[in-house]
Image: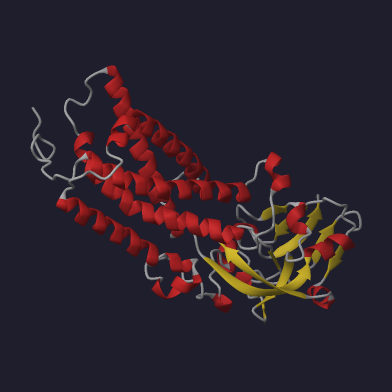
Amino acid sequence: MRRGPFRDGKFRSALHEPRTTVVLGRWLGAALLVCFLTGLVSHALQDPPTWLVPYLQSRPVGGYQVTQGLHVISGLAAIPLLGAKLWTVYPRLFEWPPARSVLHALERLGIFVLVAAMLLEVFTGLFNTLQWYPWPFPFRQTHFWLAWLATGGLLVHIAAKGTLIARHWRRPAVGLPQRRAFLTAVTAAAGVVTLTTAGQTVPFLSGLDLLAPRRPDIGPQGLPVNRTAAQAGTVTAPADWRLRVDGPRPYTLTLAELAQLPQHDVELPIACVEGWSATARWSGVRIADLMERAGAPAGAALRFTSFEANGPYRVMEMPSEYAVDPLSLLALRVNGEVLKADHGYPARVIAPNRPGVLQTKWIERIEVV
């Protein structure tokens, strides 16, 4: 009764078979597991639940740089793996009749949800690396819940197909010659995608950074910029700019007065959710020193406010663990130069093991909370 490209007899390749699907499923599962776990780390650091805040740590210094780099690397590698796996099973996606029983219908509905969630997850993540959002819904929250939906659907699917997976888990005594060629081609595709994008995070691969949207050494003062001063509506600092520090002993400082305080140099990375990172030498005043001068009690957290006109991270809260870390600075210079407007002139936050969106620029106020 079926006509067209999905009619019986059209799926002739011998590779539409369980063994090839199981092998690809193992590789894809490993990539998705890394992507899921590192994504949870990123979400927890960007928007931690109240109960988690006391346990957040400022060390290792490059922790977020590593986890978010792995998140994007594994997510990009999953795209060719997912495409290849769907190719091996798509005859089953169009089997006829569509539902033979209620249980069969429920199974196919679960597969539809799983495939849709995984496709949305990897491609919205890809578009996020390009900072392109052609949809009306918020990316971060949607990406987070799609990850749980896809992971739950995957676990249910593995449970439903457990017997079939176990039967084809080990290498058969006699294999299909074309299977080896196909799996080699898929491995090469995933490898090329990884090698030509990982350089935006992995320094020794930067020379191969051909397909990634960022090079970590290109931008003002040798650093990339996600949000420019023009985009934030802060092309120039207010003429009467003062840093206001509110606490038990509130005070204000001009830029000249800030520059007269003890200055410290630190080597810290900027690591962004899009997967790129770059390390620089930052100079400025220790945030702990500003806290002490304001009379902040032990264990106090801080709230930073930017004078940018708008933006979801205009106000940022910093737990005590980060605030008292000697590497956390209110930076005035980067790589030996006064900050340019795009990097947060006159002052910005730089702290270890923090997402780039929380390294707030154009600071005008610090509150002890």
Q: Horizontal placement of 270 versus 157: left or right?
A: right
In the figure, residue 209 lies in which quadrant?
bottom left
Query: Could you tell me residue 170's position as x and y percent?
Result: 29, 42
Q: Vertical placement of 54 versus 275: above or below?
A: above
Q: Residue furthest top?
A: 102
Display coloring: secondary structure
Residue shown at 23% from the left, 35% from the top: 93
Residue shown at 71% from the left, 46% from the top: 55
Q: Vertical placement of 248 versus 92: above or below?
A: below
Query: Could you tell me residue 87's position as x and y percent?
Result: 23, 45
The reply to whether residue 303 is in sight is no
Query: Could you tell me residue 155's position as x and y percent?
Result: 41, 34
Query: Could you tell me residue 73's position as x and y percent?
Result: 44, 58
Q: Residue furthest bottom?
A: 336
In the figure, residue 335 lies in which quadrant?
bottom right
Q: Quadrant of the N terminus?
A: top left
The reply to whether residue 256 is in sight is yes
Q: Horizontal placement of 246 versus 74: left or right?
A: right
Q: Vertical placement of 147 versus 251: above or below?
A: above
